[in-house]
Image (tube, rainbow, N blue to C red):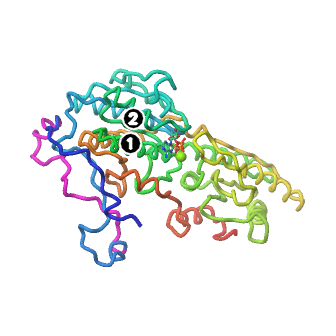
């Protein structure tokens, strides 16, 4: 369990500059909009969770620093130089975050020197990637019409000292990193290197994970758009299998270690008969196994749809030894194995089968953010800018308990967020699919 101490966000120093937002705020009462520096966002949101801490005083309960505008800033907006980089895989909303960072800096803080580094951390190492570009409000105006990232991305390790050298060379005061767990580890390494060299450089992350598997940040941006897109494939699968004799649809969706997309996409339309996620083990064989249960379902209802998170069932096939450029394990092809097993099982039992496979994979991460995600991206980006201008570093913006909050990078990369097999989300899935509680 995370401690209050671990949740303390590092600051670069005393905030001495007045926020240019003052004019905005002056029009209202004196305290409108500004964050009360003494306030905290609680991790616990039920009385029983609080009670489980054994009656410790409120100011010792683990809590986050709230996000939002500060009255005083660490950086002088007139002189501040900013860099932005996107790393790791694509996710809906990356361009929305870039746009909102640029607009917030320009329009509200008057910070106009913004560099967009190309192709992830490679773009921060001179000579490794195309030259950086200058980001302006007119450049970012229409970038949210398309998915992906206008800055490009990459995987693969880069030299952190060289990155910091380059930041110093370019006189960058603030680096915004939009990326996944690996990117945040990189951001932490950059912040540490800057600290060791006693450099006042703020490194602030906007965490990106299409799988929604980063802990302590609430729901990740782009997740809602992603599962809505995945739900379209499940609907398509339903239509296909209902028209076929012995129709079985297998829909593989993203979710390497966490099955959130599978759960939410399945719940969106009640079109799934089985949801298989990495958090809940299952067997194929045996009376209670998936194959026998599937056959039964097809007999009863004429067809069935299986929603498979890509990381589910990895324990049922030989372990993969392959890794990508960043050292992440490349998952084995369980979807292929499952299809072969279903085909064999139906044949062995002399049952008719029309097997259809759907892999919306890259489709769901390349679409533009839906309006709700666009709003979310904008607000995360604005909070990230507020934090950085106030000299916060080595942190990410999150929205735990629907409150914008600052979370140290070291705690968000320590664990992953997963679907709780004993929690209410998984129960909703079981209720919606009527799949057995236990197929292990
Ligand atoms: P996702 O997995 O969601 O697609 P990610 O950010 O986890 O996104 P990675 O490719 O794992 O994607 O990492 C992004 C970048 O961060 C890569 O360039 C990788 O080399 C770098 N990186 C990862 N861990 C570290 C680290 N400990 N120190 C420095 N750089 C790191
Ligand atoms: Mg990752």
Relative vertical location of residue 102 with respect to residue 203 in this rendering, above or below: above
- Residue 127 in magenta? no
Judge whether residue 49 can be spotted in this image: yes
Q: Could you classify mark 1 by the number of other residues whose Cα lies within 10 Å: few (under 14), some (14-19), or many (20 or more)? A: some
Give me the C-alpha separation between circle 1 and circle 2.
Answer: 7 Å
Q: Which residues are magenta?
A: 21-48
Q: What residue is pinned by disc 1?
A: 193
The image shows residue 65 at horizontal and vertical percentages of: 28, 55
Quarter placement of the C terminus: bottom right
The image shows residue 172 at horizontal and vertical percentages of: 32, 30
Q: Nearer the viewer, residue 251 or 196?
A: 196
Q: What residue is pinned by disc 2?
A: 164
- Secondary structure mostly seen in magenta is loop
Judge whether residue 150 can be spotted in this image: no
Q: Are marks 1 and 2 in contact (CB under 8 Å)?
A: yes
Quarter placement of the N terminus: bottom left
Q: Disc 1 or 2, which lies upstream in sequence?
A: 2
The image shows residue 243 at horizontal and vertical percentages of: 75, 47
Q: Nearer the viewer, residue 13 or 51?
A: 13
Q: What secondary structure is found at the residue carrying circle 1?
A: helix
The residue under the point 50% across, 45% down is: 182
Outermost front residue: 197
Q: Nearer the viewer, residue 409 or 86?
A: 409
């Amino acid at each position: 369990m995370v401690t209050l101490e671990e949740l303390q966000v590092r600051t670069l120093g005393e905030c001495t500059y007045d926020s240019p937002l003052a004019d905005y705020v002056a029009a209202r009462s004196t305290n409108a909009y500004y964050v009360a520096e003494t306030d905290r966002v609680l991790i616990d949101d039920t009385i029983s969770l609080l009670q489980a801490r054994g009656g410790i005083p409120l100011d010792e309960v683990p809590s986050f620093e709230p996000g939002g505008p500060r009255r005083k800033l660490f950086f002088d907006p007139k002189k501040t130089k900013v860099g932005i980089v996107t790393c790791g895989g694509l996710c809906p909303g990356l361009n929305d975050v870039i746009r909102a960072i640029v607009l917030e800096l320009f329009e509200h803080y008057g910070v106009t020197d913004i560099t967009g580094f190309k192709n992830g951390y490679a773009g921060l190492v001179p000579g490794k990637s195309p030259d950086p570009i200058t980001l302006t409000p007119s450049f970012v105006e229409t970038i949210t019409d398309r998915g992906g990232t206008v800055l490009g991305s990459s995987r693969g390790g880069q030299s952190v000292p060289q990155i910091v050298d380059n930041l110093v060379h370019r006189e960058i005061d603030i680096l915004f990193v939009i990326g996944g767990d690996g990117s945040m580890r990189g951001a932490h390494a950059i912040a540490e290197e800057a600290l060791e060299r006693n450099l006042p450089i703020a490194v602030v992350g906007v965490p990106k994970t299409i799988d929604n598997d980063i802990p302590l940040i609430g729901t990740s941006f782009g997740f809602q758009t992603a599962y809505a897109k995945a739900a379209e494939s499940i609907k398509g699968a339903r239509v296909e299998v209902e028209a076929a004799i012995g129709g079985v649809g297998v829909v593989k969706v993203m979710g390497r270690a966490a099955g959130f997309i599978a759960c939410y996409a399945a719940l969106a339309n009640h079109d799934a008969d089985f949801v298989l996620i990495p958090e809940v083990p299952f067997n194929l064989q045996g009376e209670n196994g998936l194959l026998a249960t599937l056959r039964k379902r097809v007999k009863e209802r004429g067809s069935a749809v299986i929603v498979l998170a890509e990381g589910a069932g990895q324990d049922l096939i030989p372990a993969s030894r392959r890794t990508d450029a960043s050292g992440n394990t490349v998952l084995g092809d369980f979807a292929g194995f499952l299809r072969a097993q279903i085909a064999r099982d139906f044949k062995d039992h002399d049952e008719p089968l029309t097997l259809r496979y759907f892999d919306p994979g890259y489709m769901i991460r390349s679409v533009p953010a839906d309006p709700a995600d666009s709003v979310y991206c904008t607000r995360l980006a604005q909070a990230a800018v507020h934090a950085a201008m106030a000299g916060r570093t080595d942190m990410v913006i999150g929205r735990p308990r629907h409150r914008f909050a600052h979370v140290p990078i070291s705690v968000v990369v320590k664990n992953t967020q997963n679907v709780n097999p004993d929690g209410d989300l998984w129960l909703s899935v079981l209720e919606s699919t009527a799949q057995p509680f236990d197929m292990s």
